[in-house]
Image: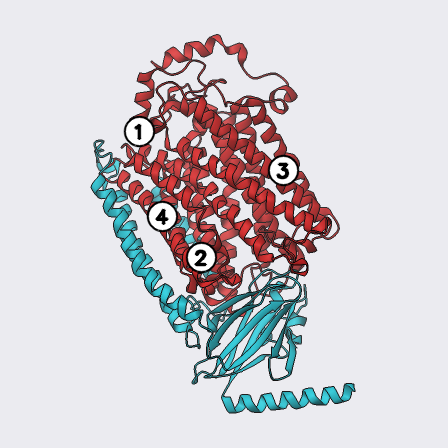
């Protein structure tokens, strides 16, 4: 009896709740990994899509098989069990071998991409990123430019417990900083990561990069934003690093090379002025 | 034939439970009493850990901080995991092992009853200490259940308490595992050969070996963190030449087998329930045993897939990617064998079967996301995001937890002698099955869209799916109260259950009366009884 009335009513109740929960603006369509803007991010996404499609195909097959059993071999439909079916070496060999082949098909492109990702040669710019509780420091090696990057004031005010500020009113809530990292597009950037206190992790989803910043260890990762993709890209610390782990965003501005050069010159000048003032 | 054994039990009635709370429970040596205590304890911990999960999901209902401080939020995620894994899952499985293994192998009790008492009674004290950290200055541990240094060393008064509590839980697990191994190796009835053992006993044997191999590794990691903190060693501190990454290697050498410790007994339970309600023997019994053993072995050589982002050499990343992908093969064998067991069966859908079928579908989804996570370059995106949260909750909640619920619905009439209200149990199933997906499926989307795990507040574009997930959490959480009520009312009374309980049960536990006699098999079952039991596979 329950199977006739219980399921639909439970589903209807759930759907009704879902409908009630939907806020006016909707980001329901944020469902998948971003295509990204670096030379490698698209390749990583296609690896993801490739495996996802294989899993979906296997799922359709396996779940289909189970559903057929559930529908066809019910006792209520008069099904009589075939108790002689206890094992079949042939079937078991087949469903061991076929998955192995599928895995090989998945592993080959993954291994290729992995090798490419590890190649840090020919980088044109090195930036040292240091994690602190709870901010990032960016140092442009060979340029003498260095600064800290912390959560912007508007987000910081809104994120306090019972702040009374609606997060929706803050632009890029929790994903905006005072001083973003600035990089040129079309240049390979080599990032060196370390930390001054606990382990952090530097993640920009659009770059398909996540690498841990570990005290006493220098990690390296490189990326190149595609020449036609200048813009601001946002991410967050991905490794639990204490109380304000959720509040140390990573923001990267990718500029055209000329704009980048101008920005760098400005920074150098400011640094020189600071030095003079300090003296 | 079963009645010849019953006659013996009648004579031994004066060997029934001791009178008085202290004598019966504190000084318990009976496998059923200890099993019951384990299960009640696990149930209590599931409720406490579940309440913590609801604090998390309440805070994540909408952007902004409404209820808790970020530090307390981190304590909740940390404690939720520790309580669920070490207080809920592991004791629940040990409780089921205590109840079922002696009955399934034809033994009167566990091999080491006093050790059994000790391994249980460590737990309430360990968790009293762990939960007490909620009330000490600085609050409960907030560095994640993986207790990574250097963050964990920043813990205040909670640090020594939680570390000591983890040591105690480890000792309890090791003792429990030794007891299982000794019981299975030495207490089987004559004629109960290894390859006649029920799948639940088999998977628990493998689990017990994993436990005695890896729990000391966790103890080592915890001890090194303690000496780093108190005695000036620098195993994990770069300042003295140590390496924080070393800790992660040691931890995950424990941690990966640990997740199979949580799921292998689930494979056993499902391998018993599906044949019963398909009215057909388990397909490919021997390959199921070998697949379980291969999964156990592989679990030792895949650990670093939890730490692809720490910066390993290319060869290391490649190795761990490929070994991890290999796990899909024996796991696939299991799923195919279960599906084939249902094929050409005669299926009915009693509550244990419903949960086992949900396990089949939803655990497989968790397996798919596991395979995706193995792909190292893609893992750089998935790692430490909500995608991972979705993945491990799919294998642990509709995976391991559904199997625990299925096991309780399957064996509860045998334990209590009463049948529970099956209509209500089916309601429990449908509510759980629907809400568990509402709860965890959207977390895949959140992770892929870029939401990190373990954050108390999030950017506004993640609001929609977080709200859905929170609805699922409250629905799922409250649905479990039905389960609590069903168990309590079934223990207190109800329609009398027959000895075989279900229509087509095979296995020695069903040859005993319902409720099962206090000392399970005081005389070993005859060959004929054993053979009748093993026709299930």
Q: Is residue B445 above or below residue B531?
A: below
Going 40% across and 67% down the picture, which residue do you hit? A115
* Sequence order check, earlier mark of 1 and 3: 3
Q: Which mark is residue B536?
A: 1
Q: Pointer 1 and pointer 4: residues touching (CB < 8 Å)?
A: no
- What residue sits right under mark 4 in the picture? B361
Q: Pointer 4 and pointer 3: residues touching (CB < 8 Å)?
A: no
- What residue sits right under mark 2 in the picture? A16
Going 61% across and 76% down the picture, which residue do you hit? A138
* Sequence order check, earlier mark of 4 and 3: 3
Residue situated in front as seen by the camera: B8 or B375: B375
* Sequence order check, earlier mark of 1 and 4: 4
Q: Callout 3: helix, strand or loop?
A: helix
Q: Quadrant of the C terminus of chain B?
A: top left
Visual hue assigned to chain B: red
| Residues at discs 1 and 3 both on one chain | yes
Q: Chain of mark 4?
A: B
Q: How many marks?
A: 4
| Residues at discs 3 and 2 both on one chain | no
Q: Residues within 10 Å of mark 2 (few under 14, many from 20)?
A: few
Q: Which chain is cyan?
A: A
> Given this view, does label 1 or label 2 mark the residue nearer the observer?
1
- What residue sits right under mark 3 in the picture? B168
Q: CA distance from mark 4 to mark 3?
A: 36 Å
Residue situated in front as seen by the camera: B149 or A38: B149
Q: CA distance from mark 2 to mark 4?
A: 25 Å
Q: Residues within 10 Å of mark 1 (few under 14, many from 20)?
A: many
Can residue B199 be seen by looking at this rendering?
Answer: yes
Q: Quadrant of residue B40?
A: top right
């Amino acid at each position: 009896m329950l199977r006739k009335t219980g399921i639909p009513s439970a589903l209807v109740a759930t759907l009704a709740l879902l409908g009630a929960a939907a806020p006016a603006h909707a980001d329901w369509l944020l469902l998948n990994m971003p295509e990204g803007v670096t030379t490698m991010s698209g390749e990583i996404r296609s690896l993801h899509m490739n495996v996802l499609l294989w899993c979906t195909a296997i799922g359709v097959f396996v779940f289909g098989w189970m559903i057929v059993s559930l529908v066809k071999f019910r006792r209520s439909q008069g099904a009589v069990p075939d108790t002689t079916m206890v094992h079949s070496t042939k079937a078991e060999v087949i469903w061991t071998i076929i998955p192995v082949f599928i895995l090989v098909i998945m592993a080959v492109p993954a291994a290729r991409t992995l090798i490419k990702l590890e190649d840090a040669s020919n980088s044109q710019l090195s930036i040292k990123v240091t994690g602190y509780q709870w901010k990032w420091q960016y140092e442009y090696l060979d340029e003498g430019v260095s600064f800290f990057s912390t959560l912007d004031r508007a987000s910081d005010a809104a994120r306090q417990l019972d702040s009374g500020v609606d997060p929706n009113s803050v632009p890029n809530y929790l994903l905006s900083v005072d001083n973003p990292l600035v990089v040129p597009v079309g240049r390979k950037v080599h990032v060196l990561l370390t930390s001054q206190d606990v382990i952090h992790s530097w993640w920009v989803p659009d770059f398909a990069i996540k690498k841990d910043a570990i005290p006493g260890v220098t990690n390296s990762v490189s990326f190149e934003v595609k020449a036609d993709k200048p813009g601001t890209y946002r991410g967050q610390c991905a490794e639990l690093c204490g109380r304000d782990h959720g509040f140390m965003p990573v923001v990267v501005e990718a500029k055209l090379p000329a704009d980048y050069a101008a920005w760098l010159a400005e920074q150098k000048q400011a640094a020189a002025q600071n030095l003079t003032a300090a003296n | 034939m079963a009645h010849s054994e019953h006659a013996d039990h009648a004579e031994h009635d004066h060997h029934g439970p001791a009178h008085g709370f202290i004598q019966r429970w504190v000084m318990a040596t009976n496998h059923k009493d200890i099993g019951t205590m384990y299960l009640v304890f696990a149930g209590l911990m599931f409720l406490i850990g579940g309440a913590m999960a609801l604090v998390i999901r309440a805070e994540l209902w909408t952007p902004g901080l409404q209820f808790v401080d970020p530090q307390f939020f981190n304590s909740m995620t940390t404690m939720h995991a520790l309580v669920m894994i070490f207080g809920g899952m592991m004791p629940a499985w040990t409780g089921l092992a205590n109840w079922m293994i002696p009955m399934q192998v034809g033994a009167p009790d566990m091999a080491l009853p006093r050790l059994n008492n000790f391994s249980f009674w460590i737990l309430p004290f360990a968790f009293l200490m762990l939960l007490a950290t909620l009330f000490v200055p600085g609050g409960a541990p907030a560095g994640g259940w993986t207790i990574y240094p250097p963050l964990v060393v920043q813990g205040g008064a909670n640090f020594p308490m939680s570390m000591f509590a983890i040591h105690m839980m480890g000792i309890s697990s090791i003792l429990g595992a030794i007891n299982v191994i000794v019981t299975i190796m030495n207490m089987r009835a004559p004629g109960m050969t290894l390859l006649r053992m029920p799948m639940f006993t088999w998977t628990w044997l493998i689990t017990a070996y994993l436990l005695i191999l890896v729990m000391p590794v966790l103890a080592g990691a915890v001890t090194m963190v303690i000496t780093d903190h108190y005695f000036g060693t620098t195993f994990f501190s770069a300042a003295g030449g140590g390496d924080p990454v070393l800790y992660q290697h040691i931890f995950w050498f424990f941690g990966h087998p640990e997740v199979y410790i949580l799921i292998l007994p689930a494979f056993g339970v499902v391998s018993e329930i599906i044949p019963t309600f398909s009215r057909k023997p388990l397909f490919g019994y021997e390959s199921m045993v070998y697949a379980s053993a291969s999964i156990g072995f592989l679990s030792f050589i895949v650990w670093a897939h939890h730490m692809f982002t720490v910066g390993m050499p290319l060869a290391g990343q490649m190795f761990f990617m490929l070994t991890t992908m290999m796990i899909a093969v024996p796991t696939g064998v299991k799923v195919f064998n279960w599906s084939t067991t249902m094929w050409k069966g005669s299926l009915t859908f009693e509550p244990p079967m419903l949960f086992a079928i949900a396990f089949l579908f939803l655990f497989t989804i968790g397996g798919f996301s596991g395979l995706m996570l193995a792909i190292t370059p893609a893992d750089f995106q998935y790692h430490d995001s909500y995608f991972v949260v979705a993945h491990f909750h799919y294998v642990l909640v509709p995976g391991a937890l559904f199997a625990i619920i299925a096991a309780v619905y399957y064996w509860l009439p045998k334990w209590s002698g009463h049948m529970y209200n099956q209509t209500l149990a089916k309601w429990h199933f449908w509510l759980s099955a629907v809400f568990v997906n509402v709860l965890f499926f959207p977390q895949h989307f959140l992770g892929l869209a870029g939401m990190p795990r373990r954050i108390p507040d999030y950017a506004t574009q993640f609001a929609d799916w977080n709200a859905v997930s929170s609805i699922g959490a409250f629905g799922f959480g409250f649905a479990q109260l039905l389960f609590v009520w069903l168990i309590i009312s079934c223990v207190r009374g109800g329609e009398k259950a027959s000895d075989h309980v279900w229509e087509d049960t095979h296995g020695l536990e069903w040859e005993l009366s319902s409720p099962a006699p206090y000392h399970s098999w005081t005389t070993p079952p005859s060959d004929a009884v054993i053979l009748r039991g093993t026709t299930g596979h």
